[in-house]
């Protein structure tokens, strides 16, 4: 396993990659599992709770996630070719952040529940309902697969403010 560099919005080449629509995966192979293992290690190191493959420069439809709280045992999750089958009409606001938009957080409204289908680490198809933080996180990460960042859900003013804050933080680092 290896820690990979996380692409960030303040780098033009990174941003171009982050805006790519990720391609579906044919099958869960050992090579894909190695990518997922690297992604998980990268996410833990960052630290974060979710990471899409495109964020480490691999525009394929793969997500890793771990919503375990500090002090709890790790609970890694793997989502290959995830798709939302249904979503609730009721929305919930949640303050989101993103490893590709470092040091910036803002509230985004998303459906409070979604039903999704994906392949897991073993390549088995799973259908599952997500709500709460799980629903927020899976929708956030699935946006990455479409080339959408959480700041794209914000007003232009707030998005510009986010970009300025990220660039300022990078210069100060």
Image (cartoon, rainbow, N blue to C red):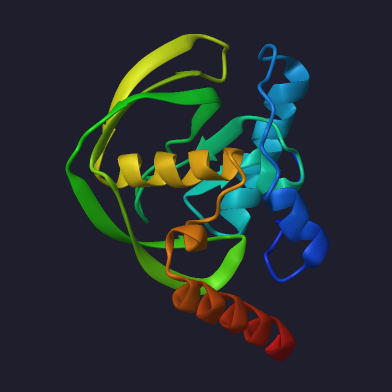
Residue 94: where, in percent of width, then height?
29, 59
Is residue 66 rendered to the left or right of residue 112? Answer: right
Residue 121: where, in percent of width, then height?
56, 20
Tally of numbered tags: 0
Is residue 92 rendered to the left or right of residue 24? Answer: left
Which quadrant of the structure image shows residue 169?
Answer: bottom right
Residue at (46, 24) in percent of width and height = 83
Residue nearest the observer in this picture, 75 or 156: 156
Residue 17: where, in percent of width, then height?
75, 50
Residue nearest the observer in this picture, 131 or 160: 160
Residue furthest right as drawn: 13
Residue 91 vertical position relative to residue 47 in the rendered view, above or below: above
Residue furthest left as drawn: 90
Residue nearest the observer in this picture, 136 or 84: 84
Residue 109 vertical position relative to residue 128 in the rendered view, above or below: below
Is residue 35 rendered to the left or right of residue 62? Answer: right
Residue 172 vertical position relative to residue 153 in the rendered view, above or below: below
Q: In which quarter of the image is the C terminus?
A: bottom right
- Res 99 visible: yes
Residue at (65, 87) in percent of width and height = 168
Residue 154 vertical position relative to residue 88 in the rendered view, above or below: below
Residue 64: where, in percent of width, then height?
54, 37
Residue nearest the observer in this picture, 29 or 161: 161
Residue at (55, 77) in percent of width and height = 160
- Res 4 visible: no
Q: Quadrant of the N terminus?
A: top right
Residue furthest bottom as drawn: 172
């Amino acid at each position: 396993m290896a820690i990979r560099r996380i692409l960030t919005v303040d780098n033009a080449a990174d941003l171009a990659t982050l805006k790519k629509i990720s391609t579906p995966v044919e099958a869960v192979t050992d090579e894909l599992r190695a990518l997922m293992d690297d992604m998980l290690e990268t996410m833990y190191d960052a630290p974060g709770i979710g990471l899409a493959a495109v964020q480490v420069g691999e525009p394929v439809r793969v997500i890793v996630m771990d919503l375990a709280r500090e002090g709890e045992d790790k609970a890694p999750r793997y989502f290959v070719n995830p798709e939302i089958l249904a979503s609730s009409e009721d929305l919930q606001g949640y303050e989101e952040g993103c490893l590709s938009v470092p040091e910036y957080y803002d509230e985004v409204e998303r459906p409070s529940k979604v039903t999704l289908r994906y392949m897991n680490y073993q390549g088995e198809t799973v259908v599952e309902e997500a709500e709460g933080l799980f629903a927020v996180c899976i929708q956030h990460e699935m946006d990455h697969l479409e080339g959408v960042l959480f700041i794209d859900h914000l007003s232009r003013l707030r998005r510009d403010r986010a970009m300025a804050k990220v660039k300022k933080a990078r210069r100060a680092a």
